[in-house]
C-alpha cells in the first residue's frame, strides 16, 4: 500500500508533469492570481514547479530552484492568494480523478509552505 512514494501513487513523471501544466493554466486564468505572473519567465517557472513537485512528493529528482521563501518574498502574496492557488491545485487533482487520500496528502504537503510563500524572510535575525 503506502510503501510507494506519493509521486508513484499519483502516476509518476508523466502524470506529475501534465498535472503541473494543467494546474498553472488554471492559476494563470484566475484574474486574482494572473497579475503576479505578469513578468514571470513561464517556461522556467513550469520547469521549476515540475522539479519542486517531484521532489516534494518524494519523486526521483532534486529541486534545483531558488528557496521558496526567497523566490516569493516582496511580491505581496497574501494568505488569500495562497488559498486560491492551493484551491486550483485541489480542483486539478479532483478533475483528474486522483483518489481522495492522495488529494489530501498532496494538499497537506503543499500547505506546509504557506509561511515560505506569504511570510517575509525577516531582517531581525
Ligand atoms: C505552495 C505553493 C507554491 C509553490 C510550491 C511555489 C513554487 C514556486 C517555484 C518552485 C518557483 C520558481 C523559483 C525559481 O525561479 O527558482 C516559484 C516562483 C514564483 N511563484 Fe510560486 N509557488 C507557490 C505559491 C505561489 C503563489 C500563491 C503565488 C502568487 C499568487 C506565486 C507566485 C510566484 C511568482 C510570481 C514566481 C516567480 C516567477 C518568475 O519571476 O519567473 N507562487 N514558485
Image: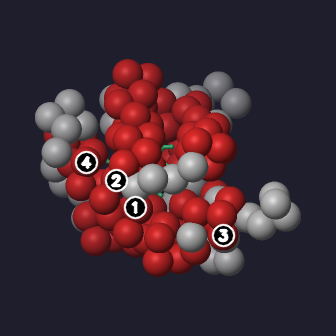
Q: Is residue 56 visible?
A: yes
The image quadrant where one finds the C terminus is top right
In the rendered view, would you say 35 is above or below 46?
Answer: above
**What is the C-alpha distance between the residues marked 4 and 1?**
10 Å
User: Which residue corresponds to the image point at 14% horizontal and 34% vertical from the top-left?
Assistant: 31
Disc 4 to disc 3, C-alpha distance: 24 Å
Query: Circle 4 sits in a helix, a strand or a loop, which is it?
Result: helix
Q: Are marks 2 and 4 in contact (CB under 8 Å)?
A: yes
Q: Give the CA distance from mark 3 to mark 2.
A: 19 Å
Residue 7 occupies quadrant: bottom right
Residue bearing mark 4: 26
Picture layout, residue 70 above or below residue 108: below
Find residue 8 and name its label: 3
**Residue 33 at x, y = what percent?**
24, 37
**Which residue does the numbered mark 1 point to in the structure image?**
20
Scheme of image coloration: secondary structure
Q: CA distance from mark 1 to mark 3?
A: 15 Å
Instruction: Work out whether mark 3 precedes mark 2 in sequence or the reverse, and give the earlier one.
Output: 3
Whole-percent x, y for residue 16 in the image: 49, 67
Viewer-nearest of discs 4 and 3: 3
Amino acid at each position: 500500500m503506502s510503501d510507494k512514494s506519493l509521486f508513484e501513487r499519483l502516476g509518476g513523471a508523466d502524470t506529475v508533469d501534465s498535472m503541473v501544466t494543467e494546474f498553472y493554466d488554471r492559476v494563470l486564468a484566475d484574474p486574482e492570481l494572473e497579475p503576479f505572473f505578469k513578468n514571470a519567465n513561464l517556461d522556467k517557472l513550469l520547469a521549476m514547479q515540475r522539479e519542486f513537485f517531484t521532489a516534494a512528493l518524494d519523486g526521483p529528482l532534486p529541486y534545483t530552484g531558488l528557496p521558496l521563501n526567497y523566490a516569493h518574498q516582496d511580491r505581496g502574496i497574501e494568505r488569500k492568494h495562497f488559498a486560491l492557488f492551493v484551491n486550483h491545485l485541489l480542483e486539478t487533482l479532483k478533475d483528474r480523478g486522483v483518489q481522495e487520500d492522495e488529494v489530501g496528502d498532496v494538499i497537506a504537503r503543499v500547505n506546509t509552505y504557506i509561511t515560505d510563500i506569504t511570510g517575509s524572510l525577516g531582517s531581525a535575525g
